[in-house]
Amino acid sequence: MITKEDSLVHKLNFILNKIPFAVLLEDSNRRLQFTNQNFCQLFNIEAKPEQMVGFNCAEAAEIVAPLFKNPEEFLNRIDEILEKKVAVNQEVIELANGKVFLRDYLPIFNDEVFEGQVWIYYDYTSTRRMEYENIRHKEFYERILHNIPADIAVFDKNHRYTFVNKIAIKDDIIREWIIGKDDFEYIQLKEKDINIAKVRRALFNTVIQEKNPQEFVEENIKKDGDVQFNLRRMQPFFTEQGEVDYVVGYGMDITSIKKAEEYIRRKEQNFAQIPDMLSIVVVIIDKALNIVFANSSFESVFGYPPSEIIGKKIEEIALSDMVSIRRDIELYETNAITEDAPKEFQFKDKYGSTKYLTYSLMPYERADVAETNYALFFNDVTDQHLAVSELQKIIEKERRLNELKSGFVNIVSHEMRTPLSVIQSSAQILELLNGADRVTKELLTLHTNRIVSEVGGMENLMEELLLVSKIESGKIEFKPFPQNLSSFVKTLLFERYSPYNDGRYMRFEERGTLRELAFDRVMMQHILNNVINNAFKYSSGRKPPVIRLRYGINKISIIVMDFGIGIPEKDRQNLFKAFSRASNVDGIKGTGLGLLVVKYFLEFHQAKLRFKTKVNTGTCIIIDMIENPALDV
């Protein structure tokens, strides 16, 4: 008679054997009362869980201690935990082979009487490596951004800061505080004019609504009363759906340019003395575009002393492109207007070094000669340009990733176009036949079958795409357990390939001593279906394919041989890439995703795939399944 207690124990044993953790239950004398299969697998114990009941766990700990990085510390820690009898959660343990486990400990008390404890172990190796890698990448890119000589900030869609570099906010405490805050909170903290935050918010909203970058000059009154001008730009970045994902803002100090322009406009009568006091380059040209003046800063930027270029044409000061300057002069002469915003260009100086400059053009009337002259103000922004260029490289990297995704979608759309055309044409023919006087059953069946076939092909493509997406996003479960591979293959052949749709049967062979193998049934079915179906599909009209199981030393090999068209040498290196198919398939249908999925599923099993092939002779696929690999279950 089975009591309720027996039933409960049975259910608990079933549950504990199914959970993806290694569980060990000891009594108060450290005698093993229960363990599950995951525990045996995690510690490479060949005995079955039920055979271990009654073992002395203290002696067992001494045996497995050499598996850990510090055996003595491992044993001392167990003694310490047992002495305190206090629950322990997610304690990190390092193994000698580089793996990392997490350990939980739970003491068991009944009416304050200690009755034993539960130990739970998890394989944390892959997760820890990913965490370290993510931290390393984050620190790498932050180090770059922090050292770019420009104000850089990243905002979410609600205009809240998600990153600020050290150039923008030097104070570490404030820079950490501002994450998740907005400009209104920052302005309040710094006791600045609230209108600064309002202007920034209005421009940010424009970026979000119009999905275009915005550039503006911001004036800030410093503590000493001086005005600082910052040229700021807000650049949106988008999701695959075209929505704004985040906004990058960066700014450069253009105070010197603004002040120089304003100073020159106000003090034109003292122009001859002022230019040499400026850090920017000032060049004056007459109406014929001859250089009539250059200040002392000219040499530091262009490499020539001013005396060498006076009287020469503007093109002779080594600029690579004078189209923009000439266009501004022509615009002024025809419409009497020019653009005030600085423009950027690059050139090579006297020594061959590439530099980046911004320039502004200001026409004015010279009273002494009664003609219009033009003042050009050049500012060396090479350092700022290189900083922005580094940021753009990071942004370009993200853009390329988005383009890869878009290319993926474009390829899929091309794969869908042909079957849709076939379905449409067959549907139109059926519509015409519906009104005809004499319609044969064979004709209706032909076009109906074409539609069904193409819909099936589209379904296969979508299923493959969804499967690849699940795999790449880590949303697919891997559930291996020991089972009879021979029975699995025979059942698959009987259910799906007895016979194949062209009437052929696959020959099944076995060599070696049959034994069980741990594998995931769903993944293995997908692997075998793909390679078997390919063997039939690409050997139409020839001898039927052969599948053989070969039980070797420490591995079981699955061999699938066909006598078909083979794979050209030029196509072999792309065999496992998405949407890649051999050049000799000649209209044989396929998604180009099957072997990619096979590759992913074999990686789950830590299995290897080899192949031998010869055009017009056949292909042999060899899958080596390693026995008892350290699978992450």
Image (cartoon, helix red, strand yellow):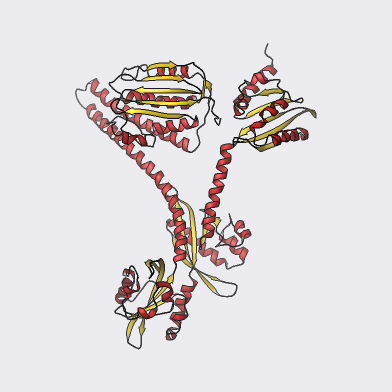
**Residue 24 lies in quadrant:** top right
Seen as rendered, the residue at the extreme left is 437
User: How far from the left and from the top, in percent, is residue 117?
Assistant: 73, 29
Q: Nearer the viewer, residue 249 or 490?
A: 490
Above/below status of 442 relative to 247: above
User: How far from the left and from the top, in percent, is residue 234?
Assistant: 47, 60
Which residue: 70% across, 21% down? 55
Is residue 335 toward the left or the right of residue 390 in the image?
A: left
Above/below status of 417 relative to 257: above
Seen as rendered, the residue at the extreme right is 112
Seen as rendered, the residue at the extreme bottom is 368
Is residue 535 toward the left or the right of residue 96 in the image?
A: left
Above/below status of 169 relative to 623: below
Q: Answer whether residue 511 is visible to the viewer in this image.
A: yes
User: How far from the left and from the top, in percent, is residue 256?
Assistant: 48, 73
Q: Quadrant of the N terminus?
A: top right
Q: Nearer the viewer, residue 377 or 72?
A: 72
**Residue 185 lies in quadrant:** bottom right
Q: Answer whether residue 496 is visible to the viewer in this image.
A: no
Is residue 252 toward the left or the right of residue 591 in the image?
A: right
Q: Nearer the viewer, residue 127 or 209?
A: 127
User: How far from the left and from the top, in percent, is residue 102?
Assistant: 64, 36
* Callout count: 0
Q: Quadrant of the C terminus?
A: top right
